[in-house]
Image (cartoon, rainbow, N blue to C red):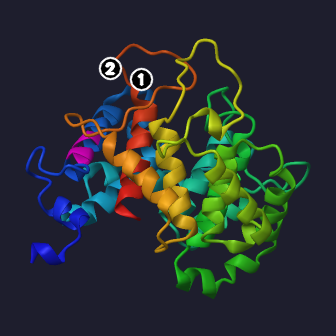
Amino acid sequence: IAKMMTRAAVCLMLSFLPGWCADWNPRLAAQFMDRRQKDWFAWPRANRDATPCVSCHTGITYLMARPALRKALGEPEPTIYETGLLESLRSRVSKREPPAAPGIGVESILAALFLPNTATLDRLLALQIKQGDSKGSWNWFSLKDDPWEVPESKFFGASMAALAIGSAPAPERDRRDLRDRPEVKDLVAYLERARTGQPLHNRLTLLWASSRLPVAMPAAARRALIEEVWQKQEADGGWSIDSLGPFEFKPEAQHTTGSNAYATAFTAYVMEQTAPGKADPKLAKALAWLRRHQDPEGGYWHADSMNHVYAAGGMESQFMRDAATAYAVLALLGR
């Protein structure tokens, strides 16, 4: 039977044996991600009023990757951390905060993405900015922290909103003609208007969204962006963090050159979504890079903060590691 299975499938079945799989170890990755969520839920800064924050680096990525790992590993139930993060989002849907508050814009997008139903989708569209240069987008955090919380990150958030709309279940999408709503047309107009000058990281997010909502990005722009991404691939198959910019130089950050685990994992996953099922030697090279760079003991893919040098082992020092690990898992599982 084993001879009829792909190596990846055999690895998943036997990943409980330490060191068995020369490619990568899904179970170790799951253990790392769960351990990080345990610490996240206990961290006071992330868990005010018993409602853990769903952050871009640790929460969003966990909710995307952990269900895929759970399915691959044959686990029957969601983890307590999946359930806790979703309950946190669910508890905020009915909150009435000032529409201009960045947090409510972020949460409305995440609720629509992870809890898609009439209430969350209606709330998403209701909280959209209705006028000015940002018309069609949502308020988003701008805290001078790359790559998710800088002024340009409003575009990242709008791209995630497009992903949520494009990923809505068919009955909900079709029953409400969701994609034909005026708010969606305003979103598409904003994405077209604001796309020029965005860091590659944000444009990759839009490319990802357009795989679910094609109207979000013209076909010619998609082709040009895909070509740009492949041109920036390193000889070893990865991508550098600088290639996802331009980003503001941060003298207090750890500066690295060459292929980076977060940049490679995120880019490989997005490129995989643009042409699912199609073999591409450049993508295969990127996936091979990821297979080589999982920590054999910790199960993670290491990446440093783009903003600061934190004390080793602290919560903040592992944020980019969280994101790199989740996107590496998604890319390697082909989800």
| Residue at 82% from the left image edge and 73% from the top image edge | 182
The kind of residue tagged 1 is Ser
* Residue at (30% x, 43% y) in the render: 33
Reading the image, the residue beneath label 1 is: 317
Horizontal side, residue 313 vs residue 100: left or right: left
- The answer to which quarter of the image holds residue 41 is top left
Mark 2 surroundings within 10 Å by alpha-carbon count, few (fewer than 14), some (14 through 19), many (20 or more): few
Choose between 316 and 72: the one closer to the eye. 72
Q: Which mark is residue 313?
A: 2
Badge 1 marks a residue whose secondary structure is helix
Magenta region, residue range: 28-32
Badge 2 vs badge 1, beta-carbon distance below 8 Å? yes
The correct choice, above or below, for 182 with respect to 135 in the image is: below
313 drawn magenta: no
Mark 2 to mark 1: distance in Å? 6 Å
- Position of residue 273 in the picture relative to residue 210 (left or right): left
Q: Position of residue 147 (x, y in %)?
A: 61, 36
**Residue 203 appears in view:** yes
Front position in the image: 248 or 38: 248
Q: Is 323 located above or below residue 220 in the figure?
A: above
Secondary structure beneath label 2: loop
Task: Decide if residue 78 is on the left or right side of residue 135.
Answer: left
